[in-house]
Image (cartoon, rainbow, N blue to C red):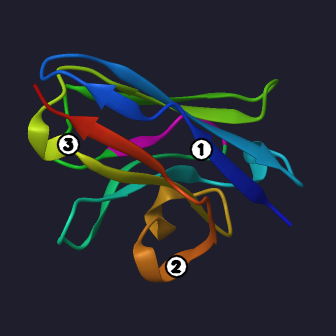
Amino acid sequence: QLQLAESGGGLVHPGGSLRLSCAASGSTLELYAVGWFRQAPGKELEGVSCISGSGYSETYADSVKGRFSITKDNAQNTVYLHMNMLKPEDTGVYYCAAPEGTSCNRFFKSAIDYWGKGTPVTVSS
């Protein structure tokens, strides 16, 4: 069974950068599309980004396009979310998640089969 563990969250000033990591165990990430959701205080869970099992397809929420990028390292069995030009509205708990299958077409909340426990990100001056 796939298990996901996030790390890399923290406090950063507006305009700063962070890199989140999602380390997988129990299976190889080549068999799964993997990505990130986030939940801001008092708001709904929002899909942020996804990378396909092959690594050749990526998706991004409009709110993060041009600022965030997602990559994967198959040798390390890890997915990364590179967050640049951070804004206060990026604050929230970031969850690594994966549905069954390799396509990001299934990367929506009700289709997720595996969740990490989350890592908090705070963007504040």
Task: Say above or below: 16 vs 41.
Answer: above
Q: CA distance from mark 2 to mark 3?
A: 24 Å
**Label 3: element kind:** helix
Give the main secondary structure, helix, strand or loop, of the magenta stretch. Answer: loop
Task: Say above or below: 118 vs 14.
Answer: below
Which residue: 11% across, 38% down? 88
* Magenta-colored span: 54-59
Q: Mark 2 vs mark 3: which is more N-terminal? A: 3
Point out the frontmost of discs 2 and 3.
3
Which residue: 40% across, 46% down? 120
Q: CA distance from mark 1 to mark 2?
A: 20 Å
Residue at mark 2? 111
- How many neighbours does mark 2 have within 10 angstroms: few (below 14), some (14-19), or many (20 or more)? few
Which residue: 26% across, 20% down? 84
- How many neighbours does mark 1 have within 10 angstroms: few (below 14), some (14-19), or many (20 or more)? many
Residue at mark 3? 90
Q: Mark 3 vs mark 1: which is more N-terminal? A: 1
